[in-house]
Amino acid sequence: MSQHAEHDPVPVTPATDGGDDPFGWLEDVEATEALTWVRERNARTHRTLGSGTRFEATERAILDVLDSEDRIPEVSRIGDHLYNFWRDGAHPRGVWRRTTLDSYRTDTPRWETVLDLDSLAEAEGTAWVWHGASLLRPTPAQLATGQPWRRALVDLSVAGSDADVTREFDLVDLRFVPAPDGFERAEAKGGLAWADEDTVYVFTDLGPGTTTTSGYPRTVRLWRRGTPLDAAPVVYEGRTDDLYISGRRSRTPGFERDLVHRSIAFYRSETFLVADVGTPAQTLRRIEVPESAEVGLHREWLLVELRDDWAVGGRDYPAGALLAARLDDFLAGTRDLTVLFEPTATTSLAGATWTRHHLVLNVLDDVVNRLHVLTPPDGTGTGWARSAFPAVDAVATVGVRAVDPVESDDVWVVTTGYLQPTTLSLTTIGAPDAHLEALKAAPAFFDTAGLVVDQHFAASDDGTRVPYFVVGRTEVLHPDGDAAPAPTLLYGYGGFEISLTPSYSGGLGRAWLDRGGVYAVANIRGGGEYGPAWHQAALREHRHRAYEDFAAVARDLVARGITTPARLGAQGGSNGGLLAGNMLVRHPDLFGAIVIQVPLLDMKRYSHLLAGASWMAEYGDPDDPEQWAYLREYSPYHRVDAATSYPPVLLLTSTRDDRVHPGHARKMAALLEHVGADVTYYENVEGGHGGAANNAQAAHMAALAWEFLTRRLAD
C-alpha cells in the first residue's frame, strides 16, 4: 500500500473556495509521509529519465561548463584587492578568495584563499551555501595611516534557503570573530549592515512581533558590539503587513548618512533619513517622493525613478522617468527636478550606475542596450552634460558596474550574447582616451558556426507588439525553401518588472543548440523590457495578458515554419513556473512538452505559504472573493480538467526552497497523476529557490530538463 493511500479517493480537481484540499498534506515539507512520496517519485525519475548514456553525457557537459577553470572570475574591488567567490570541481561549495588588479590582468592570477566553504562545512557539519559578504570601508583617517580593510559580515545559508546566518569575519587574520566579541546573527530572513567598527544595523527575526506576515524583518535596531542584542535600541518599527524593514549607513566621506528603508509591498516603499540615530533625540525624515518611486543617493544628489506619473512643482513627469535634484534643496522644499531620462514607445531605463563624478545610464531600446554618460553640474555649470560611452558591441547585452563609486570613475563592463561568450572589460568614464580594456574573455563552450540570432515581434490577442529572440541553425531560421520543423524551446518569465536580455549559456549550447534545437525567449508583458507600463499591463486582474503574449509567440514560431506544436516546448521557473503552468492548462494544444521549475501553481494558497504574502501586489489577494474570481482563472492547480489531454510535463523543485513553497509543485504533480497525465517529478533536497546548492546539483537538474525535452520533442 502506498504511503498516501489513506487520502484516496480524491475528486478530479481540488476544492477551490476554501474546502479541503485532497493533496494539502503535501504542504508539510518535512513530514515523513510527504518525503516518502517525494523519494518515490525521485527514484522513478532517475530510473526513467536520469540514466542512460545521453543523460550522463549531458550532465558531464553541463558540469564541465559550470566547473571550467576558464570561466571569468567575477570580482569586486575592496581596497587593494579584488575579491571573488568561486566554485569548481575541487571546491563544490566554493571558496572566497582575493588577488590584485595587476595579477588579475594576467592569464593565471595568484589567488589567496580568504574562506573555504568546503572546509568550513566539513569542520562544522553544516551544508553551508554562500550568500555574500559586506565589508566595512575604513575612514579617510584610517586609510591615511595605512589601516587595511579588515571587517566583513559574511552571510551563509544552510543548504541554500533564503534564511541565513551572518558572522563577522577578520580579513587580516582570516578567521571568524566569535561572539561575544564578534557580531553573529542567528538563522532567519534578514541581515546585518555596518554602521561603524563597533555598531551594526540588525534587521532579523527576534521573536514574536518582529517579523512581517511575509516572514521578513519588521524592525531595525542599532546593535553595539559586546551588548545584548535584545537591548539594542529600535530605530524603526514597521507594520505587520509591511514587506521588509532595513537600515544602513552611507559612509561616503563628507556625505555620511543613516537611512531606513521601509518596503511596504512590492513597488511601494519609503526611505527615511535618520538623525541622532539610536539616541533619545533620534528623528526620522521621509524623503517625500511617491511610494511607487525608487530613490537613490550619491554624494549631494538625489535620484528618483518613477513607476507612476508624478505631478509636482507645476510639472508632470511620466512613469519610467529618472529625475535628479540636489538633496539639500529637495529637503528644503524645492521641487526643481531635472529629467535625466524619459521613456519612449520603444525605450526604458535598464539601470543607472554612479561613479565618483559621473552617472552611466543603461537604456533598453527594443530590448537592445544603449549606454549614455551624464555628468552633473559642479556648481558652476548650467546643467547635466551628456557624452558618449566608450564603444561597445552594438548587438550584445551590456552591463555596467562601478569599481568604487566613492573614489573612482572606473567601471566594469560585461558584454554577452546568445552566441557571444561573456567578456569583462575595464574603462574609466570621462578619461580623454577612454576605451574598453578587455581583461577576461570566457571560452566558447559550443560551436556557433551555422547558428544565427533573430529578433521577431508577435501580435498578442489585443494587438500588442511582443518581441522575442530566437536562436538556431541558419537553415531552420533562414531556409532557402521548405525546412523541416525543429525541436524548439520557448522560455519566458513575465513578472516583477524583470527584463530578459540575451546572454551566453554554455549548457544551453551543448545540451540543445549543438543537437539541432532552437531556443526562443519571449519578452512578454509583466517584465520590464519597456519599463513600468509593460510590467503594470499584466498585474493582478490583467495577468492573462502575459499568458496571451507567450501563446502569441508560440503561434508565431509555428507560423514561421520554425517548429510545430508537437515539437515546441515551454519552460519557466518561479513566476515563470506560473507562466509555464498556465501554458499547460490554458494552451495544451500549443506545446509538445512543458518544464515547470520552482513554481507557483496554487493561487488560492500562495499567500499563506512562506513568502507568498509579499507578492499580493503582483497577483492579488485570494482571500478577497472579488480578487479570487480573477486569480482562479490563472491558478493552474484549479484549472486541471480530467477531460483534457495535456502534453508531458516535468516539475522540478527543492525541499529547501523557503521562498516558493515546494507544495505547489508537489500538489500539481499529484493532481496531474490522478487525472492520468504524463507527469515527471523531481525534488532536490538542497538548493533553495535556485534549485541547487552546488554545481553538481545544478548540472543534474539541468540535465533532467534537457533529457526530458529531447525525448519529448526531438527523438
Image (spheres, helix red, strand yellow):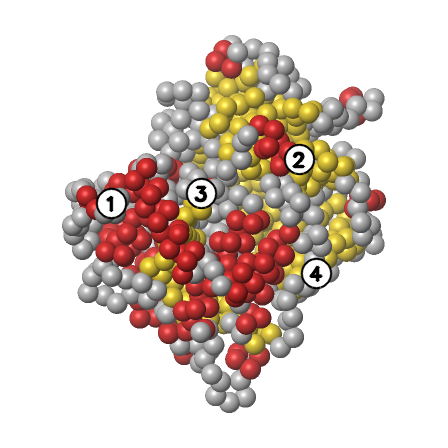
The kind of residue on which mark 2 rests is: Asp
Residue 98, image x, y percentages: 74, 38
Q: Residues within 10 Å of mark 4 (few under 14, many from 20)?
A: some
User: According to the image, label 4 marks what residue?
Assistant: 443
Location of residue 3 with respect to 212 vertically, above or below: below
Of residues 548 and 120, the one nearer the viewer is 120
Q: Mark 1 or 4, which is nearer the eye?
A: 1
Q: CA distance from mark 3 to mark 1?
A: 20 Å
**Mark 2 or mark 3: which comes first in sequence?**
2
| Image: 240 above or below 610 | above
Are dots 3 and 4 in contact, CB under 8 Å? no
> Mark 4 is on which residue type?
Pro
- Residue 198 position within the rendered picture, expressed as x and y whole percent measured from the top left: 64, 16
Q: Return the mark for residue 4.
A: 1
Mark 3 or 1: the one toward you: 1
Residue at the extreme bottom of the image, as rendered: 481
Q: Position of residue 401 (x, y in %)?
A: 66, 46
- How would you rate the neighbour count of disc 2 (Cα within 10 Å): few for under 14, some for 14-19, many for 20 or more? some
